[in-house]
Image (cartoon, coloured by chain):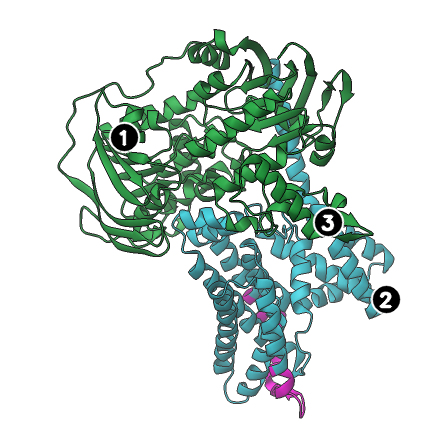
Amino acid sequence: MNKSVEILRAENISKSFGNTQACNNVSLSLARGEVHGLIGENGSGKSTFASMLCGVYAPDGGTFYLDGEEYSAHTQVEANEKGVAIIVQEVGTLNGLTVAQNIFLGKEDRFTRFGIFRPHKLNRTVNEILKRYGFDYINAGDMIDSYDYEVRKLVEIVKATHFGPKIVVVDETSTALSQDGRDILYDQIKKISDSGNTVLFISHDLDEVLQLTDRVSVLRDGSYVDTVVSSESSTDQLKILMVGREIDRKYYRTDYGGTISEEVVLRARNINVKDKIFDIDLDVHKGEILGIGGLSDCGMHDLAKAFFGAAYNRSGEITTATGVKINSIPDAIKNGIAYTAKDRDNESVVLNASIRDNITLLALAKVRKGPVISRTKENQFAQRLADQMSVKMQGLEQFVAGLSGGNKQKVVLARWLGTEPQILILDSPTRGIDIKVKADIYSLMDNLRKEGRAIVMISEELMELIGMCDRILVLKNGRINGEFFRSKELTEHDLIHQML
Amino acid sequence: MMKKTLRAAKKQTCIGGNLFQALLPYIGLFLLVLIFGVMTNFTSVSLRNLRLIVQQSYVLIICSIGVFFIMTMGSLDFSQGSIIGVASIAIAFLAQCNLALAVIVGIVIGAAIGFINGFLFVKFKVSSFIVTICTMFIFRGVCAFLTTEKPMSAPMYMYSLDQLYIFVPVVAVILGLGWFLFSGTSFGRKVKAIGAGETAAKFSGIRVASTKIFVYTLAGALAGFAATINTIRVGSITATSGTLLETNIMISLVLGGMPVTGGSKNRFSSVVVGVLLFAVLNNGLALLQIDPNIQQLIRGVLFLAIVVATTDRNVAIVVK
């Protein structure tokens, strides 16, 4: 296939949101039949660029040319009609609708005769489409709610690709998928490019990008940096382009051969969470980083919630070093347990509140004079923690909603450091976060460990588990299925073997 | 360098915008007083009329404090008027024996109804809007039932208590306590956090369910207390006593700059400014001898206009 014919050209595309210039005169070109990577740190403008291409936002300036003609779309449906589709980062299907209704959302007209909608015709069509994709186990007439996250992503893939669009944008879709789901996604991407259409692939996982794409374009701070040919590039090269300077490759811990303390700070016995976790016993030791890994539905996220007293239908006992039982979130916080959730925006920060209010909310007792909350103390307290975490902000009054993913996570950590926790449960602490902030988080974890605090890190990224943890437990179907100790020889393969 | 100054400039206009929005209710109040003053040849700002405005605002202001906390959590309360109704009947009846007892029972009844609201809302996860509309109908029914024969009359001595020097300090103290509770205590922060993000509040160790029940109970108790003032001022309690109070409260709070979506942009001053705005508006319309039905219409249009104009659409993306 000749991959040199231009299908899309973006010329000087710009977009700003309030104070933030999300895209600044971005110009790039996609070729017919290629898989084109788009990478950059958090807040570099990748998703904004994709959203403009797909009719979610209108650009402030600049023009897209599709097949040589000026192209613009005001809605996603219009973009679809013109041959551009997107698979989004977060959940893109709607609850309360069937699989078929989701796939043809906004395009129901073609199943309507004389003004009457004909669901059977829709379902029949969609079942045929699903069969074509090899997804026989998905039924067009079922409510989307009855499927899990993975299957719903597959439905989104079908939704975006079944009509053979000229350009399919895949925005960070792989991060949330298991290996199986990823393989299916890669397969579909290949099919699209084989059929002569183009994929714009956005991802944080640079290995994946290099493996999958023909060329990669890099954005930095909203501006276009460069486009490189994937087969002639390396992850290090891409990182340098993304960050604008060379990054030390060793941002993980470098020490080996340490011993884990005998002192147990958190003890879990016979933990069961209905349908999720079965008979888990484990001890967390003082000053260790305990990693918990597995497939995304192996129960590790529920286990994290259980430690924090936040899991429903939990049985068994979780006790601290002093023998206090942890049965609710207030119990956990009172006894020095901190928890950063995978669902950062909903569970770990109050989006529509200021950075100050977020930080002090967890430590109200520390900013009081007698029964009265002191504004001065509050400001000092929040400022100290925000500085400690070097949160990039306009001021303490800024709402958390306006921060980038990495900065949000810094606020999350600042909040919890204010409670001076002895045990930190960090669920996917670096999820969707760029390299710079990742490195900051790793060094913070290392420091906390050295201070003798215990950390439980739940992660889907095996490299970070291997790089950071003293001990790794692998979960499979809600049970512990392997324990590994820190060692230079430990590989991803060892862990994967116990996960599957 | 240039980027930095640009950002600083944008930040300032941003703060300027917030400031304007914060001052809007005060500007509105000033304009309203001015307009009605001119239109009524300044009888509206006579001492006698101002005193009337203050007297008409006692109940509204006390109830608004409770509802302020409820709306800060992002919830609503439509049962306030019916609480006033039921409690007033009990107060009028008991005051024949003992005033102190009557006041206490009024508060207890209010708190009990508030507790029921909060309990149903939290326990059965029914939206507060539905729950409080239902309890409103229930307790309106109780009112009607208790006053079928004849209105419940308060004992004569109660009329003599309707004095500015009694009520103004009482209302001021309650306002002060409310302000302190909201701005100066952990409780206030927790209520705000629930309104801004309930899940995150829960994960921050806030006991969301009990806080919600407590806030409803508090609002009920305040209404129960306001019922005493209502009884003293009205004298004779009928089945319709306290009707429309709930909507008047919400109109007042919204006039005072309170976002209907709740959350962290709330200011306690909304209570005072809002109630004053509402009272001045009502009083002005009455002075101008506008038909009461038309007055109702004007209030409705105004309410809608302000909600539409001030709703932060960036926050309330999903409308249910």
* Residue with the mark numbered 1: A448
* Residue with the mark numbered 3: B308
* Residue that appears at 85% across and 60% down: B40
Q: Chain of mark 1?
A: A
Q: Nearer the viewer, mark 1 or mark 2?
A: 1
Quick one: which chain is cyan? Answer: B
Q: Are marks 1 and 3 on the same chain?
A: no
Toward the viewer: B309 or A15? A15
Q: Chain of mark 2?
A: B
Toward the viewer: A229 or A399? A229
Element on which disc 2 rests: loop
Q: CA distance from mark 1 to mark 3?
A: 49 Å
Residue A177: where, in percent of width, then height?
46, 34
Residue A400: where, in percent of width, then height?
51, 36
Question: Residue B167 appears in which quarter of the rendering?
Answer: bottom right
* Residue that appears at 41% across and 27% down: A387
* Residue with the mark numbered 2: B290
Cβ–Cβ below 8 Å for labels 2 and 3? no
Element on which disc 1 rests: helix
Give the magenta range.
Answer: B142-170
Judged by its main secondary structure, the magenta piece is helix
Looking at the image, residue B14 sits to the left or right of residue B109; the answer is: right
Looking at the image, residue A27 sits to the left or right of residue A452; the answer is: right
* Mark 3 neighbour density, 10 Å: few (under 14) some (14–19) many (20 or more): few
